[in-house]
Amino acid sequence: MNTLIWAGIRQHRGSLIGVFIAIFCAALLVTGLGVLVESGLRGGVTAERYSAADVVVAGNQELTGLENLGVSLPERTALPADIDTALSEIPGVDRIVADTTTPLSWGTSAVEAHGWSAAALTPYEISNGHAPEAKNEVVVDAALASRTKVGDTITLGNGGINAEYTVVGIASATGSAQPTRAQHVFVSDATASALAGHAGTPTVLGVFATNGVSAIDLASQIRQSISGTSTFVGSTRGDIEFLDSGAARNTLVALGSSFAGTALLIAIFVVAGTLSLSIQSRRRDFALLRAIGATPKQIHRLVAKEVLIVASMAAVIGSIPGYLLADALRFGFSQGGIIPSDFALSYSAMPAIIAIIVVVCSALVAAWSAARRPARINPVEALHEASITPSRMSVGRTITGLVLAVGGLAASATPLFLGGTAALAGPAGAALMLIIAVALLGPQLVRGAVNIFGGPLRRSSSPSAFLAATNARSNSRRLAAAIIPLALGIGLGLVQVGTPSIVAAEAATQSQDGVIADLMVTGGPTGLSAEAVASIASTAGVKAANPVALSQAILKYDEFGDPAAEAYAIQGIDPNALASTMDLDVAEGSLDQLTEIDTVALSTDVAQTTGVRVGDTVNIVLGDGTASTSRLVATYARGLGFGEVTVANDVLSAHTTSGLNAYVLVDAEQGQEEHVQEVLAASGFTVVNQGELLAAGDTARNANSLVNLIALFVILGYIAITVANTLIMATGERRREFALLQLVGSTRRQVRGMMRMESVMVVVIAAVLGTFVAIPPLIGISLGVSGQPIPNVSPVASLLIVGSLSALGLLSLAAGTRSAMRSAPINEIGSRE
């Protein structure tokens, strides 16, 4: 058996090279995604400003959500009351240093302000001048020293209100620990408390241990003694210093897991298709083995051992560059703001080991499936099929494909019957169901398409056209092996590109239609405080000023009898100024009731998802972890444009880190628009046209779109490699066919012309199938998002996907044809292949 296995590998190395490439790429992809998942558990950002503290204590920044996955809270959570006293009583605590962080603006840039006592947590020391003492004194870090010098007066803005400070010192970081994430200024502790929101209450405490007490032991004692807190030591201190680091962990786990699931499914289909082609090219060998007495078990063992050898080598080698792919994905995600640019990945052998096991096991399962027919078929029938391509498909495969096709079409239509996110989940899953259905029904679909497209070719006077149509008709199963991977890539690409385009277009439309104010005022790089809003409202000519605060909220509800939770964009508005500044298109209830205590308004989609109606209670967790039970007073249609959840401005501002507003919508007295704009601009505010308002959640949507594009780029890259590999393999199998055609009178030009015709048929059928796979889900998503049956997708992006994959198919088939016709026909017809 072993001799036969190695002889088979040597004899059929051409087809097995194709299998090797498919498994190599699959292992590379799975390893790279595994590194992302592991980094979500163990990676992070190195602490900068809190590097001197042994233990950093803060409120819990993670909310346990569905399936025990942590949901990162976007705002800093509050510490328990009297925590200073409780900490000081814990053995091993030497001293406690409190810190507050206040965003200030210096011109067009943002800086972070802290009390000078908090410098003890940092690597900063005074290198020139002295520490701040008076109310208007400030120390700048070395990175800001190039903009000023000791003795200068600078203007710093807090929430749109400017104040002058005298620079009394320069603080430099000792050693090589120079903070680079942000630029910092230090003021007196009293000034820092006055500047900070929420009455200057500290949100972070740095704890120094007494001599001989380890940071890990001290952190453990703190967690056991004080509930409602989280402790951070060593490398994890960066998670609380930079909240985006902790959020990035959960993001990488979620992205890596979901991305890996899709990629692995595609990899299994590709590897299975490649193995099927390889085994099909050797059907003569298996037929002879069956004819001379080989048992089905021996055929299975032969195939399994060959695949095990090839797959193991390919998976081990492919897992190595998987780490480079992970680093490339990290760079792409960081450029899009999905994870911090300085987020460090965690590298270990575990992702490679898991990838090797998963990919090799998948290859063995695919090999077993592909070898079933040559192992079980009657020896006489096997010899007959060795000369033709079998056209029949199993009944089970046909039924499964039809069921998935019907299910995919039904899921695409869910927006006609359901609302909310459930309506969008159906079409999203429908795309995958339809892709699998097309893969299963491929030979039948291709046979029907060939009959349609091949009819005119068979009646053509061109020998090449006639040969192409006849060959395609009699070998539709082989042609399907070339068409299905292309159709899969086109369908997947169109859905991935079209979905965010539909959502973004509707969000922009809702945002533009819903702003009825004359002007929008922003606070520069930081935001606008309540004092700034009051100043804007008191400006002559201003009729109404509506401050808008933005954050995220988590809604808890029951879904099909099970507890569920989902994060949504939330806005805080002034209900009294709403009528003349913002139109949310209220569907039921009244937004005026938001002035009452514990009230909330939801978009119609979220209300349907959570199953609540006006008057019902809604369980909300605000961005800082504060849970509340609010009464639903209104539902509105423009949730994508303004946020799915709306509350009163003072309610939301009290639960954001800075307590500042993102912008203020201003309604001016008739004829006073230009005057109001000039006055506000002269006061230092940034005034923009209402058309420049971004839809709520646009930043998150843009990030998600980038994630989809990166995922699409990687998956399409994988599909492109495997498509080229599959097409070259499928064409290479026809060397003897090309030789026979030439020996019976066809010229090389006619054979190449036949293959050009077949190539056009392949890419046209693939483009049609891929487009038909994408259309039902995109229509369903469009109906669910905008109510319109025609999806708002980019024609340029769609044509780019279809065109690039079609061009790849043409080039691959041309390369395969050229390679297959290199040998002389008389030599090829007598070969053992």
Image (spheres, rainbow, N blue to C red):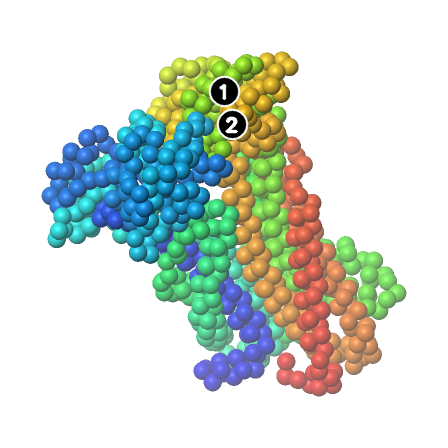
Task: Say above or below: 477 vs 552.
Answer: below
Location of residue 222 by image quarter = top left
Task: Say above or below: 152 vs 653.
Answer: below
- Mark 1–mark 2 Cα distance, whole angstroms, equals 9 Å
| Amino acid bearing label 2 | Phe
Task: Say above or below: 560 vs 20.
Answer: above
- Residue 33 seen from this side: yes
Q: Which residue is mark 1?
A: 536
Give coordinates of residue 235: x percent, y percent.
Answer: 30, 52
Location of residue 745 by image quarter = bottom right
Are there few (<14), some (14-19), or many (20+) residues within 10 Å of tag 1?
many
**Residue at horizontal 30 percent and vertical 53 percent from the top:** 174
Camera-side residue of 96 and 768: 96
Cβ–Cβ under 8 Å for marks 1 and 2: yes
Are there few (<14), some (14-19), or many (20+) residues within 10 Å of tag 2?
many
Q: Which residue is mark 2?
A: 685
**Residue at horizontal 58 percent and vertical 47 percent from the top:** 496
- Residue 585 seen from this side: no
Camera-side residue of 93 and 428: 93
Camera-side residue of 38 and 511: 511
Left or right relative to 736: residue 314: left
| Amino acid bearing label 1 | Ile
Quarter of the rendering occupied by the N terminus: bottom left
Secondary structure of residue under mark 2: loop
Give coordinates of residue 339: x percent, y percent.
Answer: 44, 48
Give coordinates of residue 131: x percent, y percent.
Answer: 28, 40
Image mark count: 2
Camera-side residue of 130 and 407: 130
**Residue at horizontal 37 percent and vertical 19 percent from the top:** 598
